[in-house]
Image (cartoon, helix red, strand yellow):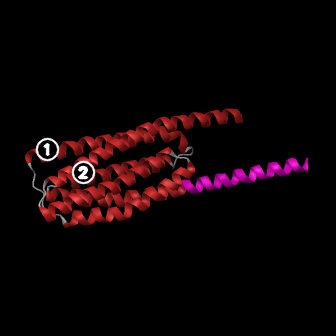
Amino acid sequence: MLRRRELQLRVTASNIADDRRRRLLQRRIRWIVTATIVYNLIEAVVAIAAGTIASSAALIGFGLDSTVEVLSAAAVAWQFTRRDPERWERGTLRVIAVAFFALAIYVSASSVLALLVRVEVEHSPVGIAITALSVVVMPFLSLAERRAGEELGSATAIADSKQTLLCTYLSAAVLVGLVLNSLLGWWWADAVAGLVIAVFAVREGIEAWRGDACATSVGMLLDEEETRDH
């Protein structure tokens, strides 16, 4: 009888520890996505303004990608304010996926148009500075959110961390395009960088949409466990 009581106490203590860890990870994800939102709002304003001045399709697309990142992070932040975040996985993943596809369509159209009409891109020191900064900042935010999401088992946090990592790749692509244009006068490098953005956006959109199926499966498993508990 005493042995059984000790086992029950250990199980209870373990459940309490797991619950505390889960709440800690949820708070951590909220802080990470809040930092991501703030940074990307600033990045979007600077990139779009600089891109408009320089007639850079890639830089404008990069700024729009920052707005998608804000939407994605805001959706995750909203999800983790719910009492039961796991039940909102499916809808949040769909928001992220649709945002990716919309970005890909816009950037593809603007880049192809720039190539067809041969839009000359002006030198943009501000654009180079903001993309270089993003290459440094975004990987840290992505890694922190991914680790927390994997430990928590959150498909949306992992998908959002991939979107943040995508911002790093896009930053590098746009940075290369801007530098090539400034140093060598390769006006087409900017539009090509824009098409690279579109390709990555489609890929990540598909992965986010496929993650919707994973989230549904997780939800079904949780329902089954609750049914067995009752």
Q: Is residue 124 left or right of residue 103?
A: left
| Mark 1 residue element | helix
Would you call the spot at circle 2 few (<14 residues within 10 Å), some (14-19), or many (20 or more)? many
The quarter of the displayed image where residue 83 is located: top right
Precedes in sequence: disc 1 or disc 2: 2
Would you say residue 69 sits in the magenta stretch? Answer: no
Marker disc for residue 113: 1
Q: Residue 172, position in %: x, y?
A: 29, 58
Q: Nearer the viewer, residue 126 or 121?
A: 121
Main secondary structure found in the magenta portion: helix
Residue at 84% x, 52% y: name it.
6
Which amino acid type corresponds to the residue marked 2 in the rendered image?
A: Gly
Q: Is residue 47 left or right of residue 218?
A: left
Q: Residue 156, position in %: x, y?
A: 47, 45
Residue at 17% x, 64% y: name it.
124
Q: Residue 81, position in %: x, y?
A: 51, 49
Q: Where does the magenta region start and end?
A: 1-26
Q: Which residue is mark 2?
A: 61
